[in-house]
Amino acid sequence: MAAKPRALIVTADDFGLHPRVNAAVEQAHVSGVLTAASLMVGAPASSDAIARARAMPNLRVGLHLVLADGDPVMPRAGIASLLDEHGRFGSNMVRDGIRFFFLPHVRKQLAREIRAQFGVFADSGLTLDHVNTHKHFHLHPTVLDLILEIGREFGMKAMRLPFEVNAPLWMQPWIARVRGRLDAAGIVHNDYLVGLADSGQMDERAWLAALAVLPDGVGEIYCHPAVAGESALTLGMRAYRHADELKALLSTDVALAIRRLGAKTGGFADVLSGLQAN
């Protein structure tokens, strides 16, 4: 059997989190190898991100659904069971995942927030290239099923499959379920992902090492670039090397390595065109 041709999507997550992230996304797309970005529609700098995206028609923008460690778009009164005392989604994903699965009233509120985030993205006027979730919460079966149900209403055609080639064996059944659900729903996806093991550390060295052994098929490399600043973007990102990740996206050596692959590049809509199920 012939090997599948290579295609590569280069995505920046957390678009809209901070003006420093938005500036990095713009630089990396205009002057570097970035082809896509995942937008947090409820984040503090989302309006700035949307304005920048409108001025970059070749940047493919997707919805980065936030259901953990971030800000909602719904008023607290409608989703109170999802939020902590500060009005934000918490960071205890194990506890929240159990509640999503077992508590009907929590699932109802979760569906309400997911639909609201899709709606805010639709109102932006941007074309929906793909959908993924902050901290890959769509590995949770309840979250995934709700996204598939609600996303269909908003024209969702592609999602990220968070499968890294060297993922631990215990992850395989979860990944297989996600892949099966996406395929059954007619939602196209990448074959593998690069960046999980080096989240926040995708510097030029990590990029060149990954590109040297990139598998065949449709790959996505994701990262978290931001221009340099005096403080961490969030407490959970204190160890992230955002400026080094931006430098890698602007690297001429990285760009040359991608060109040498002969891979088709772009967003999900570009590299997966023609694969959407009827």
Image (spheres, rainbow, N blue to C red):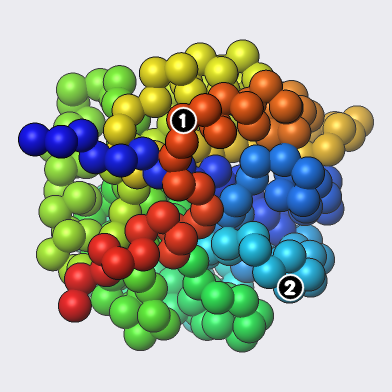
Label 2 environment density (alpha carbons within 10 Å; few <14, some 14–19, many ≥20): some
Q: Earlier in the sequence, mark 1 or mark 2?
A: 2
268 relative to 199, above or below = below
- Which amino acid, by three-letter code, is at mark 1? Leu
260 relative to 152, above or below = above
Q: Residue furthest left?
A: 1
Would residue 7 be visible to someone looking at this image? yes
Would residue 88 be visible to someone looking at this image? no
**Which mark is drawn over residue 54?**
2
For the residues marked 1 and 2, what is the alpha-carbon distance in whole angstroms?
A: 30 Å
In what quadrant of the picture does the N terminus appear? top left
What residue sits 44% from the left and 40% below the top? Answer: 263
Task: Kindly state the secondary structure of the residue where label 2 is placed.
Answer: helix
Q: Residue furthest right?
A: 230
Image position, residue 53 (x, y; %): 72, 66
Label 1 environment density (alpha carbons within 10 Å; few <14, some 14–19, many ≥20): some
The foreground one among 80 and 238 is 238
Task: Kindly state the secondary structure of the residue where label 1 is placed.
Answer: helix
The foreground one among 247 and 100 is 247
Image position, residue 159 (x, y; %): 37, 58
Residue on which disc 1 sits: 261
